[in-house]
Amino acid sequence: METILNIDFAILDFIQTTIKCVALDVVMAIFTYACSKGIIWIAAAVTMLFFRKTRAIGVAVLAALVLSLLLGEFGIKLLVRRPRPFLLNTNVTLSIVAPSGYSFPSGHTASSFAAAMVIAVRGKRWMGICAFVAAVMIAFSRLYFYVHFPTDVLAGAVLGVLCGLIVLFIFKKTKLDDRINRIGRSKQPD
């Protein structure tokens, strides 16, 4: 465990000493705050609900977000109880508001990858690419701001992808997509 922790800190310290700068602080803050409480993904999903072609994707994204929240925030985090890196290395000055809660896994990353997975599989190709780029940037922002270890982010990405795949599997097996897509259609006369 100590070896993994040393590698985690080495990566975080490398980012702090070679990449971190004032200009990137603004860009990374946009990504990190856009995903606070999953807001960017919730907004995307709710927007999709308004259009029949994307309604099922929106519902699936919301389901994947809920699953990642339940498993990550109310499950794994409470079992592992890993402190955040800035609490262990007090020499680092945060340039964002210090988050509360435990570190493992990254909730920002889990929700981002859960949503991106659903969008990539069910949406148009460009939507999937944009979603995964945003997810990667959000995940990196958590390292950039020293609020998660790389292993937290990696675990969050794996958890998110798994949550997305589980929801997609359930939707396919139960044909929930078809039922959702029928909502709002006008009945055809016989």
Image (cartoon, grey):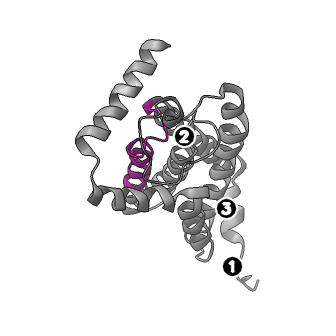
**Residue that badge 3 annotates:** 178
Instruction: Name the foreground residue: 143 vs 172.
Output: 143
Mark 2 vs mark 3: which is more N-terminal? Answer: 2
Q: Position of residue 107 (x, y in %)?
A: 58, 44
Q: Position of residue 169 (x, y in %)?
A: 63, 43
Mark 1 vs mark 3: which is more N-terminal? Answer: 3
**Residue that badge 1 annotates:** 185
Residue found farthest to the top = 2
Question: Are the residues tagged 2 and 3 within 8 Å (C-beta)?
Answer: no
Residue found farthest to the left = 18
**Residue that badge 2 annotates:** 106
Dividing the picture into quadrants, the one containing residue 28 is: bottom left
Instruction: Name the foreground residue: 183 vs 109.
Output: 109
Instruction: Name the foreground residue: 144 vs 45.
Output: 144
Q: Tell me which segment is drawn in magenta.
A: 131-150
Q: Position of residue 172 (x, y in %)?
A: 64, 48
Main SS of residues in magenta: helix
Rendered residue at 45%/20% (across/down):
5
Mark 2 vs mark 1: which is more N-terminal? Answer: 2
Disc 2 from disc 3: Cα separation: 33 Å
Mark 2, residues whose alpha carbon is within 10 Å: few (<14), some, or many (≥20)? Answer: many
Tag nearer the camera, 2 or 1: 2
Which residue type carries mark 1? Arg
Q: Position of residue 182 (x, y in %)?
A: 70, 70
